[in-house]
Image: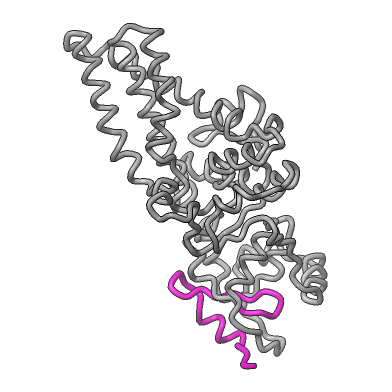
Amino acid sequence: MATFTASQVLEHQNSKSCWIIYKDKVYDITDFVVDHPGGRDIVLEYAGTDITHVLGDALLHTHSDAAYELLEEYYLDDVDNDGVFPPTATRKDEIINSDTNKRRQQQQQQPIQTTRDQAFLDLHKPLFPQLWHATWSKEYYLEQVHRPRFVPWYVPYFSHPWLDMLSHTPWYVVPIVWIPFVSYQLWRSVNSYHGSPIGAFEGFAGGVFFWTLLEYGLHRFVFHLDDWLPDHPVALLLHFTLHGIHHHMPMDRLRLVMPPALAALIGFPVIRGMHMLFNSATAHAVVAGAYFGYICYDCIHYYLHHAQVLRIHFSEMKRYHLAHHYKDYEGGYGITSKVWDIVFGTTLKT
């Protein structure tokens, strides 16, 4: 079997061709660079180098079993271990010490350990039929669904293609569908205030504030009602459909925002409630603000997962949200901000 030399690997150190060495094996992770949960910069910093010590350094970053399983899918060939390895990035020279080198030697003597359990879901087949016929216990289901997976292909939810179209949504559909709705609600509110925008603006601001609390409440008490989830196959199916699929495949670009039909279903009682609590002018403004907050939420959610975010605020929120996915899903429920996590004591440390 042909092998690659360290010098050959070093030639592939950019986003168009990104190779790395791990435990004397060469991996082409070019397709994964853009979707790396920590951002592409940290990957490109090590492009063309031996990252064995990096993945094994708990001081730098710990990786889940899913990360090692993913790595195996990009395996190219073995490296010609002639004792010469590509140089690592400068900042890593500040971290590596004698203990790290010892760990590196130990890791090179051990195979990659994974805990992939193909008995859960076959990600090459539609998911709904598998969930419908599943007989898992609640304990097993929750353990598996919160183990993130990354797949470079589209995983259908339903077997029928027309029905499957309802299960995924590109991010740009959210503003296209809901911005006209927000504009209409604002127009109705301003007209009800006889053309004065002041009352409409106050109601709109109140609606945005209401959404921030609703965002936290939905994420914590509806999407993550794990403790109260009935141990029944139908309940597990509903949990997976609503939010479990996102935790199992957090980098799926088509399942990061809410389908319009589901958003309308959740929003209907909210709209009715606002019209029961307030007069017509105020209700229209509050609904406009709430849905505007929702648009920002869904777009920011996609932005945090799949973009090189701005350092101001969003860099911290990206780190914070990915900690929710990859470290502790029982905290860090805020997407757009940490405000309500701080208020209710569910803040994650990153």
Q: Is residue 248 visible?
A: yes
Give me the residue at 70% from left, 62% from top. Answer: 116
Left or right, 288 with reference to 321: left
> Residue at horizontal 50%, vertical 78%?
12
Which of the 4 image quarters holds residue 68? bottom right
The C terminus is located in which quarter?
A: top right
Instruction: Write the residue at 50% across / 64% down.
Output: 152
Pinpoint residue 184: horizontal percent, then vertical percent.
Answer: 23, 25
Image: magenta residue range? 1-26
Q: Using residue 45 as the reference point, say whether residue 50 is left or right of it.
A: right
Percent across and percent down for residue 336 are: 48, 35
Residue at 28 percent of width and 29 percent of height: 181
**Residue 100 belongs to magenta span:** no
Q: Is residue 338 above or below residue 91?
A: above
Q: Position of residue 34 (x, y in %)?
A: 47, 61
Q: Could you say which quadrant of the image residue 76 lies in?
A: bottom right
Q: Is residue 349 visible?
A: no
